[in-house]
Amino acid sequence: MLELEDVHKVYEGKSRVAALSGVSLRIAAGEMVAVMGPSGSGKSTLLHLMGGLDVPTHGRVVVAGEDLAEKGEEGRSLFRRTHVAYVFQAFHLMPTLSSAQNVALPLHLAGVPRRDVDERVARTLVDVGLGERAGHLPDELSGGERQRVAIARGLVTGAPLLLADEPTGNLDSARGAEILGLLTRIHAERGTTIVMVTHDEAAAGTCRRVVRIRDGRVESDR
């Protein structure tokens, strides 16, 4: 499903920063993997490369058989629409749109017919336990509910890869546990490949595999 081969990422600015230095990693379809490491270790950079939000300075990033490093920005954007779902710590919901409208956004971008959009959105909101909150705006929802909407927005396209960047970081322990339970169920029921960046050992404990990053390199993979 996902392969990184000798991946380097260097940011040039006032000072040269090597965010990743020779990372090689393979993640099979259907795995649920946690990526851990201290701040500045390269975790988020790694996630961005996996989803085609950025390209490596050197090396290969292959997702579902396609080398993202060889695609232009438009090609990577089109690839993400059908292959990659993102869940962020900060939710990134449109404040003036309802839960259903937020979830529908990626389907509209993909040109899905309206009748199919409504059906898929309703089904996905039920799947994440928000069937009765479809008409609510983000500020009418709890933090945990907002994250569920964000997860539904990622799932609604049927993307086989879900990348989660600190998905419980803005939640208390109880709401965080609910989100982790939801991600675990999604993984089990849908077979979705999930890669989750986290500082939380409890969150990492929901995954069968934990990759630890330090100073831009893989420190351990268990």
Image (tube, rainbow, N blue to C red):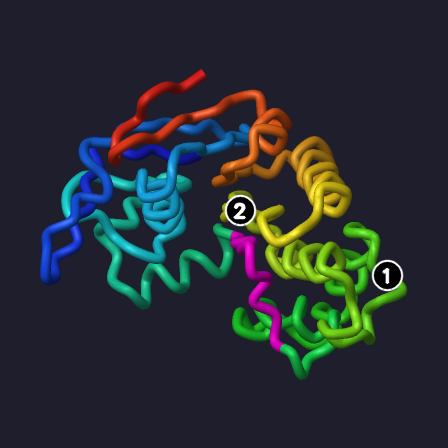
Residue under the point 70% across and 48% down = 172
Q: Residues within 10 Å of mark 2 (few under 14, many from 20)?
A: some
Which of the pair 208/89 is nearer the observer? 89
Which x, y percent locates residue 40?
Answer: 32, 43
Residue under the point 25% across and 52% down = 55
Magenta residues (range): 85-94
Instruction: Identify which amino acid the numbered label 1 is placed on.
Output: Gly
Question: Disc 2 marks which residue?
Answer: 166
The residue tagged with tag 2: helix, strand or loop?
loop
Image-based side of 78 in relation to 106, left or right: left
Vertical comparison of 94 with 204: above or below? below
Q: Residues within 10 Å of mark 1 (few under 14, many from 20)?
A: some
Which of the pair 38/56 is nearer the observer? 38
Image-based side of 42 in relation to 109, left or right: left
Q: Earlier in the sequence, mark 1 or mark 2?
A: 1
Vertical comparison of 118 with 152: above or below? below
Residue under the point 20% across and 46% down = 9
Question: Disc 1 marks which residue?
Answer: 131
Vertical comparison of 165 with 78: above or below? above
Which x, y percent locates residue 85?
Answer: 53, 53
Residue found at the very far bottom of the displayed protein:
96
Instruction: Identify which amino acid the numbered label 2 is placed on.
Output: Glu
Which of the pair 112/85 is nearer the observer? 85
Q: CA distance from mark 1 to mark 2?
A: 25 Å
Q: Quadrant of the C terminus?
A: top left
The residue tagged with tag 1: helix, strand or loop?
helix
Which of the two discs, 1 and 2, sits closer to the camera? 2
Image-based side of 177 in relation to 165, left or right: right
Residue under the point 49% across and 51% down = 84
